[in-house]
């Protein structure tokens, strides 16, 4: 295993040549099917408006749509995302959005040089909050953020301690408010970003959640900078490589049926809720249980090659059989909508309103 210190030194010496490829790499990694800052006809974002607790050991739920491959389900490990060949990038993406909120995911990361396990929150105007684990190192994770798709400086990423992340299930948390973002490993806060610290790049618009595994170290699908960042190249003969997720709890700190952009400013104050209130659930989802202080001092990534978007590029969505889920490109920020007359249950299932035994708050 290559130590992170050695890798960062090597990456720093390669900055000059990697800068030339970073622009094309980023455009392939993240995009929006309809950006509200440039179009006045984008559809409203379906709001979660509540808290759901999804137990994947009980199988799939229709509030998350698969793309880039077919995740598998088991009663012990939950949902498994396997990368076995070039082009594999299986993920799940939420049909709903949260407007500020908390994501708690209990998972085991995929091993393998060049293999990346990712949890990404992303909005239609390309605000983004990331956690990514590189399979070449089981002791740390990378936290990152982007505002409005502006990726030019590549100085936002940090490596934070996340020990033994491939051998055991750990709960990772992103807690996101108008004032700050906190990333947690278990009960330990490993990074805090305040609104002011973001220097005008603070993520603050409705976000979808997507998570899965992909090969950043595949030179046939990625630019040289991405392969270097992922500590590739990937040797598929040593696979398959699997990320496993037992459960995810998602809390929306706002209420309502949908979120719309009131103007092209991209500020959270411009976001409007249909049938609810921005920050209407703030404080109702409880607090994160903190059991320890932050670990070793985090280090900046020191590289211009950290990709935005997180989970591969341009894969084709898997049809789920649910009539409101559209097929399309996996990089799209729109996976479908919840139709009128259907509701979300606290278990993350979308059901007809008349047949629901548990409904939203």
Image (spheres, rainbow, N blue to C red):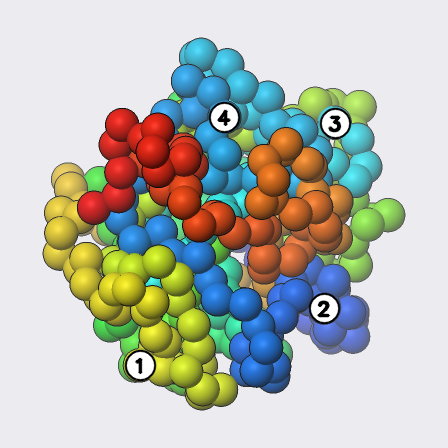
Sequence-wise, the earlier of marks 4 and 3 is 4
Q: Nearer the viewer, mark 1 or mark 3?
A: 1
User: Circle 1 is placed at which residue position?
Assistant: 269
User: Would you identify the image quadrant in which residue 263 lies?
Assistant: bottom left
User: Would you identify the image quadrant in which residue 126 lies?
Assistant: bottom right
Seen in the picture, residue 341 relative to 123 is either above or below; the reply is: above
User: Circle 4 is placed at which residue position?
Assistant: 60
Question: Residues under labels 2 and 3: Cα distance?
Answer: 25 Å
Q: Nearer the viewer, mark 4 or mark 3?
A: 4
Sequence-wise, the earlier of marks 2 and 3 is 2
Sequence-wise, the earlier of marks 4 and 2 is 2
Question: Residues under labels 1 and 4: Cα distance?
Answer: 35 Å
Q: Callout 2 environment at 10 Å: few (<14), some (14 to 19), or many (20+)?
A: some
User: Circle 3 is placed at which residue position?
Assistant: 84
Dot 3 lies on which element?
A: loop
The residue sitting at 30% across, 60% down in the picture is: 256
Question: Residues under labels 4 and 3: Cα distance?
Answer: 21 Å
Residue 347 in sight: no
Q: Callout 3 environment at 10 Å: few (<14), some (14 to 19), or many (20+)?
A: some
Q: Quadrant of the N terminus?
A: top right
Q: Are marks 4 and 3 in contact (CB under 8 Å)?
A: no
Q: Are marks 2 and 3 in contact (CB under 8 Å)?
A: no
The residue sitting at 74% across, 46% down in the picture is: 315
Find residue 30 and report its horizontal and vertical position in percent: 65, 63
Find residue 288 and report its horizontal and vertical position in percent: 18, 46
Q: Callout 1 environment at 10 Å: few (<14), some (14 to 19), or many (20+)?
A: some
In-image side of 181 versus 35 (left or right): left
User: Circle 2 is placed at which residue position?
Assistant: 27
């Amino acid at each position: 295993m290559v130590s992170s210190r050695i890798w960062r030194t090597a990456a720093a010496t390669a900055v000059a040549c990697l800068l030339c490829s970073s622009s094309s790499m980023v455009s392939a990694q993240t995009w929006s099917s309809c950006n509200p800052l440039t179009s006045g006809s984008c559809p409203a974002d379906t709001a979660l408006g509540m808290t759901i607790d999804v137990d994947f050991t009980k199988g799939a739920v229709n509030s998350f749509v698969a793309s880039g491959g077919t995740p598998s389900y088991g009663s012990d490990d939950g949902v498994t995302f396997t990368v076995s060949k070039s082009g594999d990038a299986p993920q799940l993406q939420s049909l709903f959005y949260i407007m500020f909120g908390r994501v708690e995911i209990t998972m085991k990361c995929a091993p393998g040089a060049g293999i990346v396990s990712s949890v990404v929150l992303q909005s239609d105007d390309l605000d983004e909050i990331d956690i990514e684990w590189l399979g070449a190192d089981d002791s740390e994770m990378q936290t990152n953020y982007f505002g409005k798709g502006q990726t030019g400086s590549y100085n936002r990423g940090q490596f934070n301690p996340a020990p033994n992340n491939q051998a055991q299930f750990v709960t990772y948390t992103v807690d996101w408010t108008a004032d700050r973002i906190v990333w947690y490993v278990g009960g330990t806060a490993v990074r805090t970003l305040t609104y002011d610290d973001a220097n005008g790049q603070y993520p603050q618009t409705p976000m979808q959640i997507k998570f899965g595994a992909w090969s950043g170290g595949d030179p046939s699908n990625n630019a040289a900078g991405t392969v270097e960042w992922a500590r590739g190249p990937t040797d598929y003969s040593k696979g398959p490589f699997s990320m496993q997720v037992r459960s995810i709890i998602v809390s929306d700190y706002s209420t309502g049926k949908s979120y719309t952009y009131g103007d092209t400013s991209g500020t959270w104050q411009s976001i409007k809720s249909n049938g609810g209130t921005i920050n209407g659930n703030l404080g109702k989802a409880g607090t994160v249980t903190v059991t320890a202080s932050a670990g070793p001092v985090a280090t900046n990534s020191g590289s211009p090659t950290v990709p935005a978007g997180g989970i591969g590029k341009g894969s084709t969505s898997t049809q789920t059989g649910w009539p409101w889920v559209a097929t399309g490109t996996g990089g799209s920020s729109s996976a479908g909508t919840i139709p009128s007359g259907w509701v979300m249950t606290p278990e993350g299932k979308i059901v007809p309103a008349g047949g629901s035994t548990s409904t939203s708050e």
